[in-house]
């Protein structure tokens, strides 16, 4: 599964993705990011949107590992709690399925410093949507733009 993901996508580059470490079909993932200075606000602290995005991506990758490429995980709800400031450098985002459902699943994740310090935690409710429907809806929206 890891080999089928294009890690050179502009979104991955903008988010500072270094590598996808693990995507387990049981529903877990680990991603490494580089928190860059341009992602920081006052005092050299990474802006919370990047932190939320990193954990959200880890949870989505866990869902993709579990369901394969025929499904697109769509976040219905995302809650993030911040425990410590995130500084520039390597950060590790992990996500895992907490409760499985037929179309809606519950995921958890966290962002850690290399020394294992938990910097933030998140929970997400994710709807699994047929990938063909998502692609069709995107094409339709683009044709109307």
Image (spheres, rainbow, N blue to C red):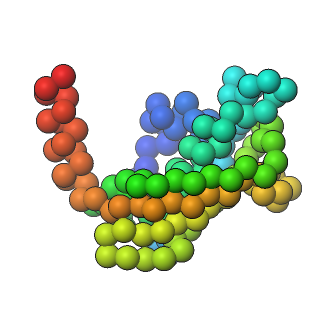
Of residues 103 and 112, the one drawn nearer to the viewer in this rendering: 103
* Image quarter hosting the C terminus: top left
Depth check: give the residue in front, 4 or 69.
69
Q: In this view of the protein, can residue 126 be seen by the observer?
A: yes
Q: Residue at x 19, y 53 (%)?
A: 132
List x then y, in percent, for residue 44: 81, 28
Q: Is residue 20 above or below residue 63?
A: above
Which percent across, then down, holds residue 63? 44, 64
Which quarter of the figure has residue 52?
A: top right
Using the image, determine if residue 91 lies above or below residue 117.
above
How many numbered marks does the figure carry?
0
The residue drawn where x is 55% and y is 30% is: 14
Residue at image x 14%, y 36%?
A: 140
Residue 130 falls in which quadrant of the image? bottom left
Q: Is residue 122 left or right of residue 60?
A: right
Q: Is residue 69 visible?
A: no
> Quick one: quadrant of the N terminus?
bottom left
78 and 5: which is toward the camera = 78
Q: Residue at x 68, y 28 (%)?
A: 39
- Please state the horizontal and vertical placement of residue 58, each as a whole percent of the image: 56, 55
Q: Nearest the camera: 1 or 98? A: 98
């Amino acid at each position: 599964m890891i080999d089928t993901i294009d890690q050179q996508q502009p979104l991955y580059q903008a988010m500072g993705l270094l590598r996808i470490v693990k995507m387990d079909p049981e529903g877990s993932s680990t991603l490494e990011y580089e928190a860059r200075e341009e992602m920081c606000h006052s005092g050299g602290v990474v802006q919370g949107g990047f932190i939320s995005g990193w954990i959200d991506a880890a949870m989505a990758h866990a869902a993709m590992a579990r369901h394969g490429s025929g499904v697109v995980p769509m976040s219905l709800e995302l809650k993030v709690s911040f425990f410590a400031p995130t500084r520039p450098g390597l950060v590790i985002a992990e996500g895992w399925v907490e409760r499985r459902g037929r179309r809606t699943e519950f995921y958890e994740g966290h962002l850690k410093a290399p020394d294992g310090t938990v910097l933030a935690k998140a929970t997400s409710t994710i709807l699994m949507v047929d990938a063909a429907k998502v692609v069709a809806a995107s094409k339709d929206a683009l044709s109307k733009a």
